[in-house]
Amino acid sequence: MKIGIFGGTFNPPHLGHLAAARAAIDVLGLDKLLIIPAAIPPHKELPEGTPASGHRLAMAAKLADALLLPGVAEVSPMELERQGKSYTSDTLEALHKQYPEARLWLLMGTDMFLTLHLWHDPETILKRAGICAFGRTEQDGEAVFAPQREHLQKSFPKADITTITLPGLVDISSTKLRELLAKGEGAEYLHPCVYGYILMKGLYGTRADLKHLDIPELRACSYAMVQEKRVRHIRGTEEEAVRLARRWGANEDYARRAGILHDCTKYLTGEEHIAICEQYGVPLDDLERTAPKLLHSKTGACMARHIFGEPDEVYEAIFWHTTAKADMTVLEKILYVADYMEPNRDFDGVERLRELAYQDLDKALLLGVETTIQEMRERQLPIHSNTAQAQAWLRDHGVTTEG
Ligand SMILES: [Fe+2]
Ligand SMILES: [Fe+2]
């Protein structure tokens, strides 16, 4: 087993880190990549305004999730939990004990590589791990790496060193990035889920007004709240909802915002859902109390209204996007149908639903509702009363799924 170890302060983790992690996994053929935020780096003090270590750990976890390699990329709190200074040699000894059979690879940028001989206990480092240094710019090529590699190999004959230059790698220092963030800039250097986390927690002096975010910021906040694997679906729903709003004359901006936020609470725990409903006075029925995961539409609506300042129309569309209900507004129908048939959805009958969505929105809604009812029956799950009422209301109003 090959394990990559990616340490650093991750203050904050940015696109350069992400690209380096991806390249290392590919070039070294890693089975596992451990992203390990450092507690107190031996070679520098943490700059003022550095978020609490819990935030750096959370952002590093988002970086790991953004790689979309579950089971491969993981974050480890081992250095944050260890008392005193974070020495890489201690980390490698601990990992060697934990994974005695594994080949460890220590990843680092050019600056770190060029000073490696000055680190605490370089002998242990080079005994326990291979070194994978990556250059951040075209200039960080062989000419820079070769003398240091030779020097290290002379001093430590068993040293195993791989160097890679990643042309086009995002070249930004964390120091510069923190300065940009304090001025309300720098989003282009961050993965959206990390940027959204920074905005929502107000880190690095960002002070964003969450109730007046622009669309890219709203997306970032939504993506920061979910797992990366869900983002494609959210993006698809946003785009489909906007297309449907254009087709049916609804407010495109509301459709977009509802699409962006509709699943933002999807990964909360049952207790978290219930706490949000209690906080904002949303009544729960018996079915929802026993299966609080069903509540993500209601808690998502609460976040949209109370955290992001969205209007009632957006609140209601998100609120009803799972169950539907009798007598829905056009925007509510649009989000329900868009969520069902956005381009990443794939199930028997989705093509028919896509066709109907642009021909007759009520027929599409009824088809969606009846598909859900059918599925619930097959899985022997209870049908939500609002879903049954949606079906009855549409049928009473002469809607069918024929034609
Ligand atoms: Fe949903
Ligand atoms: Fe959804």
Image (cartoon, rainbow, N blue to C red):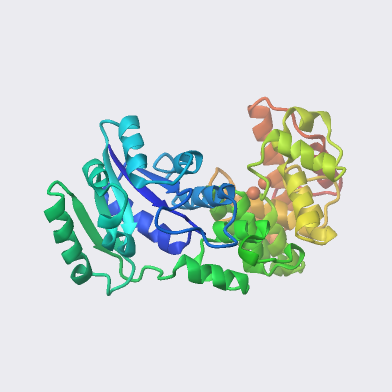
Rendered location of residue 299, percent (x, y) = 75, 45
Q: Looking at the image, which residue sits at the far top? A: 380
Rendered location of residue 361, percent (x, y) = 73, 57
In percent of the image, x 25 and y 61: which residue is there?
Answer: 164
In percent of the image, x 48 and y 65: which residue is there?
Answer: 174
Rendered location of residue 74, percent (x, y) = 44, 43
In percent of the image, x 37 and y 68: which residue is there?
Answer: 169
Rendered location of residue 298, percent (x, y) = 77, 45
User: Is 186 left, or right, of 202 in this rendering?
Assistant: left
Quadrant assignment, res 139: bottom left
Quadrant assignment, res 209: bottom right
Viewer-closest of 256 and 110: 110
Viewer-closest of 35 and 291: 35
Residue 403 visible at all: no
Residue 176 visible at all: yes
User: Is 328 left, or right, of 123 in this rendering?
Assistant: right
Viewer-closest of 247 and 289: 289
Viewer-closest of 243 and 122: 122
- Which quadrant, please, contains the N terminus? top left
In percent of the image, x 82 and y 28: which residue is there?
Answer: 286
User: Is 27 left, or right, of 350 in this rendering?
Assistant: left
Task: Give the total of numbered labels.
Answer: 0
User: Is 101 left, or right, of 182 in this rendering?
Assistant: left
